[in-house]
Each structure stands twice: as structure tokens, then as C-alpha cells.
Image (spheres, helix red, strand yellow):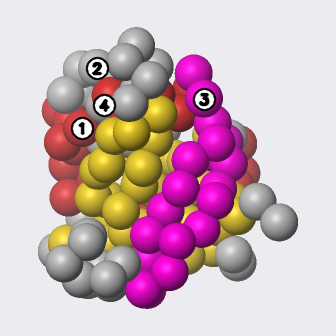
Amino acid sequence: MRLTGGRFGRIGPMDALLLTTKGRKSGEQRDVALNYLLDGDAYIVVASYAGEDRDPAWWNNLKAQPEAEVAVGGRRLKVRARESEGAERARLWREITGKDPAYAEYQLRTKRRLPVIALEPVH
């Protein structure tokens, strides 16, 4: 990130962002690159962990402290995370798996329902 001045590109068929969370145990900043789908002004990410049976650490961090930061398109934004549910989740899931079918494969690998997370800018 420091080398690219906040510019991040793609991971596979989707655009990517860098999410910075606060470690729920350490309190230290933790960075992770994630694919995202833009929905209005929210960045939509999936806590897939490639279909593992446990949630990724970044999602556990966000559940403990939903305020975070994203670096995308050469800028940094403060965001608040919330899990999508119901019809919203169903719509977003269709869009995500339409763009990157790997997420549907990840869902088949695990018994947990993959969380679809909205990272909403804090204004």
C-alpha cells in the first residue's frame, strides 16, 4: 500500500481494496486485501475464507469493532461494517457470484453461511 500510494487493483475478476481493522485481541492494525462489489456508496465484501469452516480473522475483528478503514482508488475512507441480511443479502449474493463464481464454490465447501458485509462510509 505504501508503495502504491493507496492504489489497489484487482484480485481475479473483481476490483480489490485494502481493509484495515483493529485486532480484537492485540489492538494492532491489521490489513487484508479483499475483492469488493460497489453497491451505492458501500463496499460489499464476503467473509469467505475460501470456504473454510471458520470466519476469517478480519471479520471477527469487525464484529468486535465495526469501525475500520478502506484504501481504494488512491484514497482512504473510514467505514462501518454491517452484515447484510434477508433480501439485501440475496440480491448482493447473486451479484457477487455472478461476477466471481468462486464464491459459490466456497459456499459449497463449508456448513457456515458466508457473511456478506457492507462497508459503509462514515460521513
For the C terminus, give its image quadrant.
Answer: bottom right
Q: Is residue 93 left or right of residue 88?
A: left
User: Quarter-wise, where is residue 78 in the image?
Assistant: bottom right
- Residue found at x 63% / y 73%: 39
Q: State the residue position of label 3.
A: 65
Residue 68 against residue 111 in the figure, above or below = below
Q: Amino acid at mark 3?
A: Gln
Q: State the residue position of label 4.
A: 56
Q: Amino acid at mark 1?
A: Tyr
- Residue found at x 64% / y 56%: 79
User: Gap in Å between the C-alphas at discs 1 and 4?
Assistant: 5 Å
Disc number lying in front (3 or 2): 3
Q: Amino acid at mark 4?
A: Pro
Q: State the residue position of label 2.
A: 54
Q: Give the magenta part as a residue range.
A: 64-82
Query: Quick one: label 1, few (<14), some, or many (20+) residues within 10 Å?
Result: some
User: Gap in Å between the C-alphas at discs 1 and 2?
Assistant: 8 Å
Q: Is residue 67 left or right of residue 35?
A: right
3 or 2: tag closer to the N-terminus: 2
Question: Residue pushed farthest top?
Answer: 25
Q: State the residue position of label 1.
A: 49
Q: Is residue 78 visible?
A: yes
| Mark 1 and mark 2 residues within 8 Å of each other at the beta carbon | yes
* Element at label 3: loop
| Mark 2 and mark 4 residues within 8 Å of each other at the beta carbon | yes
